[in-house]
Amino acid sequence: MSESEQQLTKEEFVSRLTLERVVRAERRMAPNLPTLKEFRQHHDTVLGAPGGAVLDLAKILRYAAGKVILVEVNLDLLVETHAGVPLRVFASDLDFARAAQYVRGYLAGEEATIPLLKMHGTITDLETCVVSEEQTEQGVGAGKLEVLRELLGTNEEPRLWIYVGVSMRDRDLLRVLKGEEFAHQLDERWVCPYFEETIADYARERDPFWKKTPRPRIEDRLITETADAFFSALSSVWETGATIRSD
């Protein structure tokens, strides 16, 4: 265990456990990473049977060109397979070298295909998969950092970000998101049925920046619903053509 991990209780270690930490331990005993290969096999088995959240997201994407950008830390192909509309997928470092330019054009109305930014790669190309602590400890890399900054709003008009089922444990992304410009220029919401401690930890660091906003507490930003319930409600609004309000 690392020096910082040795200071944790068993419960604290479990609460912070990530796939990357598991892979770090597994790599010493099985360098061919059977966990990742097992995930690929399971993924291919269930890919054709998406849940309600994926299907309702697909409904939203029919009306979302120019209005939505998708960002994933998952490796699976559920969104690409069932979107029903063209997506511009960015997964490899080479892809991300061109991502910021594309997103700028998309936000300016010059590109119509919805971007899908797969921050941790895709299971169809294991070379792109960010699955070890060694990788996450090195940060996101230049291309991903540049495109994330393109997703910022301004201090006066922060851009709405909705984290769905995100536990806020990804060390590489946390290094970026905890920066001052992201704190000021994002209007962040969380969709999660349980108020996880890792979200609470993140929110505590945001408190000084949220104090003077219309939503000064994490409770004002937390939607305690499952992804299925959230996307079902959101898709019904999109389909009626009603105006989507950030509140």
Image (spheres, rainbow, N blue to C red):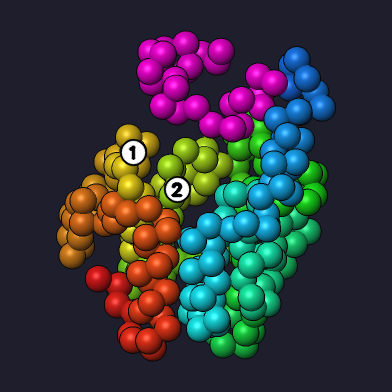
Which of these two is toward me, 102 or 120? 120
**Which SS does the magenta portion mostly show?**
helix
Q: Earlier in the sequence, mark 2 or mark 1?
A: 2
Which residues are the magenta region? Answer: 1-26
Q: Position of residue 199 (x, y in %)?
A: 35, 42
Question: What residue is shown at x 44% (from left), y 43% (from top)?
Answer: 168
Which quadrant holds residue 240? bottom left
Q: Residues within 10 Å of mark 1 (few under 14, many from 20)?
A: few
Kind of residue sitting beneath label 1:
Glu
The quadrant the N terminus occupies is top right
Q: Position of residue 80 (x, y in %)?
A: 67, 65
Figure quadrant of the C terminus: bottom left
Q: Which residue is mark 2?
A: 166
Please tell me in which quadrant of the rendered image residue 191 appears: bottom left
Tally of marks: 2
Provide the residue designation for mark 1. 196
- Whether residue 141 is visible, yes or no, is no
Specify whether residue 224 is painted magenta: no
Image quadrant assignment for residue 21: top right
